[in-house]
Amino acid sequence: MAISGLKGGIFLALLTMFMLGLASCDSGKGTGAAESLRGGETRPTLDPARFTGLSAEAYQAAREIPEVIDSLYCYCDCEKHFGHKSLLTCFVDEHAVYCDICIYEALMARDLHRQGLDAAAIRKAVDERFGHLRHSGPH
């Protein structure tokens, strides 16, 4: 009977570990997935009031949804040329005001966020839209 109890205990322990493992799977949803996409930019963005037009709108978007903007690759390739961590880095200085790619990526992200998409879905859409627009050198 002790063996039967031991087998039952092992079975329950394995079943519990299996269920805990399933529960921890995120399937690309929730905060865990969004956090894993982050580039790691922590500096504040510049004040949108310093700019006009689409530039001001893009700086405002970066200020409103930094966790989303930080999850996006900037297709002007500033990571490669200037060491940027993510699209959000473009908005901590005046880099973005001189780059249409930065501006349009941020505005697209803002619009998709307003439609209720999460960071992973926004990243996928931005990658599909801007992936072919890489610069060959610094701009």
Image: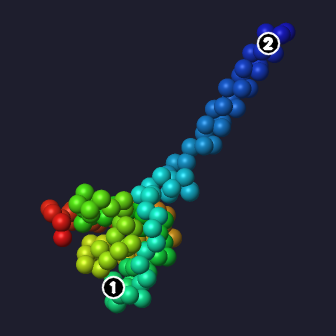
Q: Secondary structure at mark 1?
A: helix
Quarter-of-image position of residue 91? bottom left
Q: Quadrant of the C terminus?
A: bottom left
- Please state the total of marks drawn on the protein image: 2
Report crowding for label 1: few under 14, some 14 to 19, many 20 or more residues within 10 A (C-alpha).
some
Q: Is residue 10 left or right of residue 104?
A: right
Q: Is residue 34 left or right of residue 46?
A: right
Instruction: Report if residue 131 is visible in the image.
Output: no
> 23 or 89: which is nearer to us?
89
| Whether residue 20 is situated above or below residue 74 in the rendered picture | above
Q: Is residue 116 left or right of residue 123?
A: right
| Whether residue 16 is situated above or below residue 90 in the rendered picture | above
User: Which residue is depicted at the point 74% across and 26% down?
Assistant: 12
Q: CA distance from mark 1 to mark 2?
A: 71 Å
> 127 or 88: which is nearer to us?
88
Residue 107 in percent (x, y) is at 37, 77
Which residue position holds label 1?
A: 54
| Pair 1/2: label in front | 1
Q: Disc 1, disc 2: CB below 8 Å?
A: no
Which residue position holds label 2?
A: 4
User: Which residue is depicted at the point 41% across and 78% down?
Assistant: 46
Q: How is the image coloured?
A: rainbow
| Whether residue 28 is situated above or below residue 49 in the rendered picture | above
Residue 30 in percent (x, y) is at 56, 56
Q: Secondary structure at mark 2?
A: helix
User: Which residue is depicted at the point 25% across and 57% down?
Assistant: 80
Residue 56 in percent (x, y) is at 37, 85
Quarter-of-image position of residue 10? top right
Q: Amino acid at mark 2?
A: Ser
Q: Is residue 116 left or right of residue 11?
A: left
